[in-house]
Amino acid sequence: MSKTFVAFIALLAVASAEHFYVENNATGLACIILDGDFQFNLVFNDKNTTEKYTATINNTLSVDGDCNGVINNQSVQTLNIKFHPEGESARYPKEWELNIVFGSSSNEAFKIIDYTLQTQRTASIPYFGKFERDEKAAGDVTATETNAYKCSTAKLGLVGGATIDIKSANIIAFAQLNGTAFPSNQIYEVCYLDARTSDVVPIIVGACLAFLVIIVLVGYLIGRARAKRQGYASV
């Protein structure tokens, strides 16, 4: 298994999305690129109560990964991010860790097949724990051929009802890109939620236009009927 060189850059772009990539030092090509803002919606069950908290990344401490990993005889690629969340303080200096595993198959160029989140106490979150992938709500982060994945909010379900949201997500794995940013001609596959929204909008617009046409037609017929009645009355 060859090691990979991993780099991280926080971009202050228009979308202000974080920018992560994993580069294979054997080839000099990027195998993983992930642009997006992470939001962690956490659920802690303490005795008979359920506590919910939201956290985001404050600053990234380190990034690690592998372009040539193997898990259970399956080729995988990994992205590991260690960071401090918003609300951390000197009293709670421990880092959080997010691990994402990408797999590939004959039908999919890449797919997120596993992920875990290790949290620590912060000034605003008095609980900690390890969250694992919920197989029943694992999300649809996948693409075919050499395409990338795009979604306004990609959701990764965690056991216990917690979720990881990746906002403004642009993701690719098992790639061989000469550079650490998405090419200008990159083709994206839009997530199901956004694709459904894009299908619904034309239908709504068409329905509104049809409704306006009906209103105009009804108004015309009413006006014409009134004009006829006035003509009869004058005679």
Image (cartoon, rainbow, N blue to C red):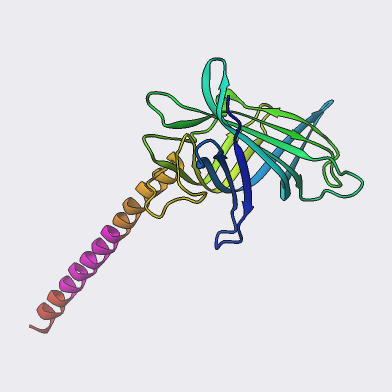
The magenta segment: 209-226
Image coordinates for residue 206, horizontal then vertical, percent:
29, 56
Compared with 224, 169 (above or below) is above
| Quadrant of res 24 | top right
Q: Is residue 199 left or right of residue 214?
A: right
Q: Residue at x 11, y 80 (%)?
A: 231
Q: Is residue 79 visible?
A: no
Q: Nearer the viewer, residue 29 or 145?
A: 29
Residue placed at 56% from the left, 38% from the top? Answer: 25
Residue 160 placement (x, y as % from top left): 69, 27
Q: Is residue 184 magenta?
A: no
Spot the residue most to the left.
Answer: 235
Q: Can the viewer see residue 9 in this picture?
A: yes
Q: Residue furthest bottom?
A: 234
Q: Quadrant of the N terminus?
A: top right
Residue 146: image x %, image y %? Answer: 38, 39
Residue closest to the eye, 50 or 86:
86
Figure quadrant of the C terminus: bottom left
Q: Considering only vertical position in the picture, is 221 above or below 19?
A: below
| x 64%, y 46%: residue | 38
**Which residue is painted at 24% across and 63% down in the image?**
213
Quadrant housing residue 52: top right
Classify residue 37 as left or right of residue 75: right
